[in-house]
């Protein structure tokens, strides 16, 4: 069956992440743990389909409560237009102990680059999820000449292929079945998992969402979310 092709691709990619990205996962986890223990929150942003990975970090069962998926109003429609990211970050609620996760398979578009530049200027830590080898071959679409990975404190490399889609079927001139949403989710869940372990080892119990569909879940979450409500409910 053709679906076996996709299963095989994804299995191989996850095995590659397991073999080659453990050190970077731990570094990302340390950034997240430090941020949460110091009273900061996680901001996660991805344009286009990378938004799927951004919401994997924020507001979901089993995840850290002090986390926010950043929703740029155009939803990435102008990610190739220089200046949009700079304008969007004007007045952004970024505080001393916050950390930022930026997700882009190519890492070449101005929107994410300008957001990263703003975060870096404020001295906050940045975790970038990207296809590193691919990004290094691509020319930046920003006048700085930089790609997103160059702003990162830690790069989580999804080890993907150029163009993201990875399955070739006879009779088609293009590949199908994107991979980066899945590999980014794996990398980020691993980083969150390790961050929670780090916090527990340091005697800090992190606030974690219980499923709203479990009896008692809404009540459990309400007690914990009140502390962060002002920050998590802001539009930016």
Image (tube, helix red, strand yellow):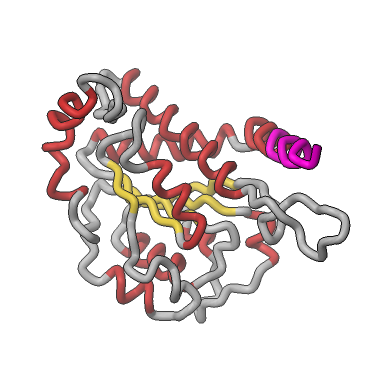
In the shown orientation, is residue 126 left or right of residue 16? left
Between 130 and 168, the one lying in front of the other is 168
Query: Residue farthest to the right?
Result: 170
In the shown orientation, is residue 153 left or right of residue 85? right
At 18% from the left and 24% from the top, the residue drawn is 220
In the shown orientation, is residue 136 left or right of residue 202? right
Quadrant assignment for the N terminus = top right
In the shown orientation, is residue 164 left or right of residue 79? right
At 40% from the left and 55% from the top, the residue drawn is 45
Depicted 98 relative to depicted 60: above or below: below
Q: Residue 132, percent across and down?
A: 63, 54
Depicted 70 relative to depicted 99: above or below: below
Q: Residue 86, percent across and down?
A: 34, 74
Bounds of the magenta segment = 1-11
Magenta stretch, overall SS: helix
Depicted 113 relative to depicted 189: above or below: below
Quadrant assignment for the C terminus = bottom left
At 51% from the left and 57% from the top, the residue drawn is 49
In the rendered structure, does residue 208 fall within the stretch colored magenta?
A: no
């Amino acid at each position: 069956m053709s679906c076996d092709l996709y299963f095989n691709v994804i299995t191989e990619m996850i095995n590659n992440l397991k073999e080659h990205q453990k050190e970077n996962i731990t570094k990302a986890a340390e950034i997240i743990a430090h941020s949460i223990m110091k009273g900061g929150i996680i901001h996660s942003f991805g344009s286009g389909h990378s938004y799927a990975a951004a919401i994997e970090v924020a507001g979901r069962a089993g995840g850290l409560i002090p986390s926010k998926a950043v929703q740029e109003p155009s939803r990435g429609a102008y990610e190739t237009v220089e200046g949009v990211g700079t304008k969007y970050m004007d007045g952004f609620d970024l505080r001393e102990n916050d950390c930022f996760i930026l997700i882009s398979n190519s890492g070449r578009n101005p929107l994410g680059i300008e957001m990263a530049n703003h975060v870096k200027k404020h001295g906050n830590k940045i975790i970038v999820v990207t296809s590193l080898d691919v990004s290094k071959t691509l020319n930046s679409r920003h006048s700085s000449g930089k790609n997103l990975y160059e702003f990162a404190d830690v790069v989580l490399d999804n080890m993907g292929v150029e163009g993201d889609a990875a399955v070739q079927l006879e009779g088609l001139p293009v590949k199908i079945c994107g991979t980066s949403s899945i590999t980014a989710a794996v990398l980020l869940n691993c980083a969150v998992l390790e961050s929670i372990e780090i916090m527990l080892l340091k005697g800090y119990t992190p606030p974690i969402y219980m499923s709203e569909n479990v009896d008692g879940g809404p009540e459990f979450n309400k007690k914990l979310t009140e502390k962060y409500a002002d920050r998590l409910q802001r539009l930016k």
